[in-house]
Amino acid sequence: MLHVKVSDREQISALGSFLTLVLALAAGMVAIGLLFIISGVNPFFAFKKIFSGSFGSLYGFKETITKAIPLILIGGGLAVVFKAKFWNIGAESQLLMGAIFGTWVGLNWGPSLPSPVIVPLMFLAGFLGGALWGLIPAILKLRFSINEVISTLMLNYICAEFLTMLIVGPWKSPKKFGFPYTDDLPDSAILSLLPGSRIHTATLIVAVVAVVVLTIVIYKTRFGYEVRVIGENPDAAKYAGIDFSRTTMLIMVISGGMAGLAGVGEVAGIHHYLSYPDSISSGYGFTAIIVAWLAKLNPIYVIFSGIFFAGILVGGDAIQISLGLPAATVAVFNGTLLIFLIMGDFFTKNKVRILAGERG
Amino acid sequence: MEEIIISVVQRTLVAGTPLLLGTVGEIISERSGILNLGVEGVMAVGAVTAFIVTHHTGNPWLGLCAAIVAGMLISIVHAFASVSLQSNQVVSGLALTMLGLGLAGLLGKPYVGKPLSIKINAMPIPFLSDIPIVGPVLFNQSPFFYLAILLAIGVWFMLEHTLLGIRIRSAGENPKATETQGVNVSLIRYLSVLTAGGFSAMAGAHLSISYSKSWIEGMTAGRGWIVIALTIFALWNPLRAVFGAFLFGGIFVLQYMLQPLGISPNFLAMLPYLATLLVLLVGGLRDSRRLNAPAMLAEPYRRGER
């Protein structure tokens, strides 16, 4: 008789870890293919469309990089908080808060300041907005032991309504034919694009630099060591004299702030005015959760996983148009791939052998 | 005046019904030691399944049954990841929610904007519904309401007074000791997660084939997350969940009542979410050790370890 034996794996080679990841993604793709068949869609055609839409043409690839910008920023921040096992599910609204703060600065100070002054100010304001919004769940957890999954999610709904309140109310532009949009940002506050694309270079540079710096901070500094210990062994962290509250608040400032930067990039680089929450962010805050997970919570790998999932977003748009599939298709991709990734983790942590004979 | 009060209370109970169903299910799962953050996604799957089956068969009861089966089936994903693979339950639950919301959107796309011709309507209970005030409020309700109340009481009795209940609770408090008693902890946890999935799906079905009779993407509107908060608020007790769920039902109704007063509808839409934070804030002020959370909640357990 066959039985399965599971035992701890002490160490796994980098190659083994990578192969597990690739296998998990491949298995996930098979599962998604099956879901396509159930929904009456030819999976080969769908996958081909997704690939050709995202990586298969220069136009598609430029769009993929455009969408990778917010994913890299947010995913990098989430990799840090998730390392400490603080489950920030609120990046979506930290992005929106950043967009709100950045837009306010751009609209009010932009007309009188030159671009090299106003753009950094907007990013600073966006970081601040996201960081402050991200501090709320940290304080709620530390002071009132409120589960951060719930508080960050509730803050998502609250912020989306708050943003809508602004654009239908006090911030509504008189020049937009009654649509609930703000005024356009002044020219000095608009980010320049890579010619022939929608890639806002400033935000892309900020994103890449940020994840490089974060990688160094996490793996080479005392603070990074504290973050890792809190996540791996909270009891040991207590005995080692690590200030749990301070570290938790700091990582939420980082994570919320990075999402806030992404919000400024979306408004100043793509939209140029505030509109409905759904159009400012198409679920970047949630997709970035998987981006961070695929990167094994290592900020530098977020660059690659961010581009990968940006490709799925862009390819998802392509099959929406060509196959008439709903926007939710991308969520099916995300959910399924995340499930297979965590299942893959099991095989990197454990040795699984199928043995013949009686259970030992 | 009397009519207004009756109507408000009636609508409060209707709005609280899916919250109660979801919370009672989540209590079972968490009592067994498994945190299930998939409620929102499973609710959506329940809602869309109930709608599609009702649409094609014209029988909403069949729709409800199909929803329960679908909810249990998709919950296997979370049960397998968290029980068999000892994965992180937060991430696995989130994945289930993403998958559920996505699948519901994908499967439901052709049915958007096609209301049902039949739904599960209020079912007055003979004689009892004739009692003044109490009658129309409590005994002229949707069958989902009666079901939710009966299930809450039933699950409370099961958890507190039956052998199965003791096993579920001890799986969440001390799985190792439970296993030495000859109880299969994994099986108990699997059953608890699957049952919770059935409950969440029922909650979703209530939204699409009784509360309304149409399918809209995103119609669960965060109710699944409110359920997770209510579980904490109810201190993992199904009877307290009855109180919590209808308190929140009242907040949903309050939104519509305050609208004519000229308050921003966006502010009113924030109320349930603000109230959730407030409720947890009040809970957090209490001594956390007395909160009574299952000791091994969200802690993976592997048989024969240590």
Image: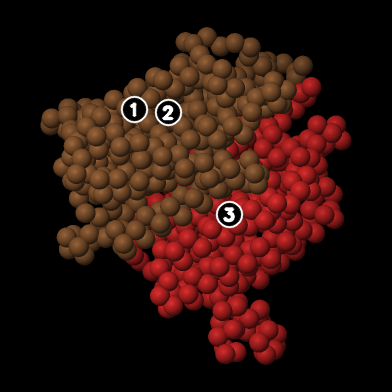
Residue placed under numbered mark 2 in the picture: A76
Compared to A290, does B235 lie above or below? below
Depth check, front residue: A206 or A311: A206
User: How is the structure coloured here?
Assistant: by chain
- Residue A190 has which mark? none
| Residue B1 falls in image quadrant | bottom right
Q: Are marks 1 and 3 in contact (CB under 8 Å)?
A: no
Q: Position of residue A246 (x, y in %)?
A: 59, 32
Q: Are marks 1 and 2 in contact (CB under 8 Å)?
A: yes
Amino acid type assigned to the residue bearing label 3 in the image: Leu
Amino acid type assigned to the residue bearing label 1 in the image: Ala
Residue under disc 1 on the same chain as residue under disc 3: no
Q: What is the residue that sits farthest to the front in this orientation?
A: A112
Would residue A252 be found to the left or right of residue A48 on screen? Answer: right
- Residue B277 has which mark? 3
Depth check, front residue: A211 or B129: A211
Circle 2 Cα neighbour tier, 10 Å, few/some/many (<14 / 14–19 / ≥20): many
Q: Colour of chain B?
A: red
Depth check, front residue: A323 or A109: A109
| Residue plotted at (72% across, 36% down) | B186
Amino acid type assigned to the residue bearing label 2 in the image: Gly
Q: Which chain is brown?
A: A
| Residue plotted at (55% across, 54% down) | B224
The number of numbered discs placed on residues in the rendered structure image is 3
Q: Position of residue A152 (x, y in %)?
A: 52, 45
